[in-house]
Image (spheres, rainbow, N blue to C red):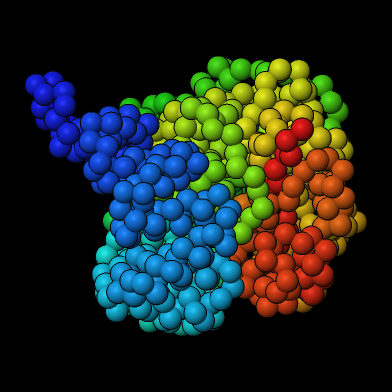
Amino acid sequence: MTAYRRALAADPAAVVQIAALGKALRHAGNPADAALWAKRCWFLQPDEAAHGVDLAIVLFDLGQTGRSASVIRCVLTQVPALIGPWNNLGNVFLCEGKTASALKIFLRLSRAFPGVPEIAFNTANLLKDLGQTTAAAGLFKTALVFRPDFPQAYHTLCRKMLDCGNARSAFTFIRRGLLLEPSPKAKALSALTMTVVADSVATRDIRPWLMAALNEPWIRPADLFPACITVLKRDGVLLADQTCQLTGDPLLLAVLQNTPVADRELEHRLIGMRASLLNRVAGGEVLGEGELEFCCALAQQCFINEYVFAIGEDENCRLAKLRARLTEPASTVTPAMLALFACYQPLNSLPDDNMLLSLSWPAPVAALLTQQISEPQEERRLMAGIPLLTPIDDDISRRVRAQYEESPYPRWTRTTCAEPPVHPEIGLRLLFPQGPHAPMPRKPVFEILIAGCGTGRHAIETALRFRDAKVTAVDLSCRSLAYAIRKSREMGVTNIDYAQADILRLDHLGRHFDQIESVGVLHHLGDPSAGWRLLLSLLRPGGVMRVGLYSEVARRGVMAARQFIQERGFGTSVEEIRQCRQEFFDREDEESLANITRSPDFFSISNCRDLLFHTEEHRTTIPQLAAFIETNNLAFIGFEIDSSVTEKYRNLFPDDKTLTDLASWDKFESMFPNTFGATYQFWVQKKNE
């Protein structure tokens, strides 16, 4: 870009350099500046259609669909037979929700130019969104006939095969697509595909992909765990008689370092191995390099799950002796001693943890020190600087805050690799192609509120997802916020302002937002509807809101478990949660409790506490959602839900073209109670007043 600017300094009217600079800026992720140079280009050569096309594209990137359409129409008056502008106009219509107009253009183009793969692809995509999957699949294959290296067609065929239950073909298509274009979007789709196909494709084929997906990561590591445990079990790793076969498995090590182990069988095996290693180290045995690496990975796992694993009395005795040895002069402390202690208690619980940081250790132990000493120290420093936006004086808010100060939630280590950010209008249209939402306001800065951000994963993903976003993220818990701030800095995310606040008092701030997201938060208020209405008062007309609320239907098993816990008198200490979990494991013949032990949230202290021991919880139904939406001047945009579910829904309710008939969704949930997991996640729009 520097070379282009030097050329322009010498000749400000050098159109070739202007056009090249505009394209370079667009590819560098700066569409606003790219638009300025594209306008200049078109002004200097108004009869050159290519300049108009470039301008229309960057305006579309900026979410200025109306202006983009105007430019395209000007170009088409000059060259009405040009394919590209017609294709772009169809995409603009799609983004504006003008499905019929877009389909008319794409069908006309596909008939006139059957050998252009991009046309076939766009037409097929729209037909797929309209539920015409057979016709869509034919056009996708047509696109590949004319362009075998068309990655987007492979991606979409992968989704089609997944929806049809053809896992092997889906994996074949996505591998081809990913090799052609390893974009974040393709990686995310590949990872999701692996969660479906892990039990049906050869483990030697899927293992390298799982390792890459975990270590980068391509999606949230917790979402990859089901595929990983399936592969580990199929390979017989958990049944291995020799410890070295288990300790040396690279996939298992990656799992231990990245996400809570959400499987009873593997948890039981790890508990036994931990006890065995403790016994050996306490007896003075020296661990080999591979065993030390495994022990450090296990210690990272135990820190991630907040030491949820059960501990026997004999282990407690050996652990007390080990702790005493760790308080002796540093020269007598071995890496194995530190690693084993960290499998039971965090290293920052030792009296002189700073001394440990000053010494040289093998790389796996150094990673442990970072995780368990350096990072918690940084979070404690950050807590002192977190601003308090509102008082927290509501009794329920105080109790909820106390819970999350003790157990920050959710537990996470890494999040998905970010796709290139899009304007919120385009992002919402991509999420709900047939959604009925009105165009959103255009502005240089898009203000988003995350009401109840917890440990920051949600806020970070939102900040990375939307272009020109300025995110305000609030939570009751300072410990959760400190974790969020540390992770944001670690990931280089700079467009989030974190603060401590009570949602119930946010109306005193005098601020308004273009988008509000509150997922898994409102149902922990004393009056969820009142909290929702308060947040809506902060939402600008035409703004959108993402909401997550517990489903009464899907939480029936959880309520039975909570009743069991209440009857047994379990409290919320770490030891009591461990004991409670063991009782659940011992009673897995009772179906209502067995379902709980299969929940990923059952496998860490804070997640288990949030699942079963929360101090305040409310649930809702779809008819109640519909009534609230109707009485509060909102438009329902749609549920965030897996495409396989929407495919099944379309087959049962074909008249609901926009997938927004809540009465039909209520019937669907009654037929399939686990449709929404435990939580309805959906978007609404505030109607213009």
Quadrant (top left, top right, bottom left, bottom right) of the N terminus: top left
Q: Is residue 594 visible?
A: no
Quarter-wise, where is residue 404 in the image? top right
Which residue reaches farthest right?
567
- Residue 623, x across and y down, in percent: 86, 57
- Residue 581, x across and y down, in percent: 71, 59
Quarter-wise, where is residue 45 in the image? top left
Quadrant (top left, top right, bottom left, bottom right) of the C terminus: top right
**Of 42 and 477, which appears nearest the observer?**
42
Q: In this view, does 227 lie to the left or right of 608?
A: left
Q: Can residue 93 be seen in this view?
A: yes
- Residue 209, x across and y down, in percent: 35, 66
Which residue reaches farthest front?
77
Does residue 199 sit above or below 302 in this rendering? below
**Of 407 and 338, which appears nearest the observer?**
407
Q: Is residue 641 left or right of residue 302?
A: right
**Of 518 and 345, which appears nearest the observer?**
518
**Of 655 and 522, which appears nearest the observer?**
655
Q: In this view, does 666 lie to the left or right of 55?
A: right
**Residue under the point 43% across and 81% down:** 138
**Residue under the point 51% across and 21% down:** 381
**Residue under the point 59% across and 34% down:** 441
Label tally: 0
**Residue under the point 54% across and 43% down:** 425
Does residue 35 sit above or below 227 in this rendering? above
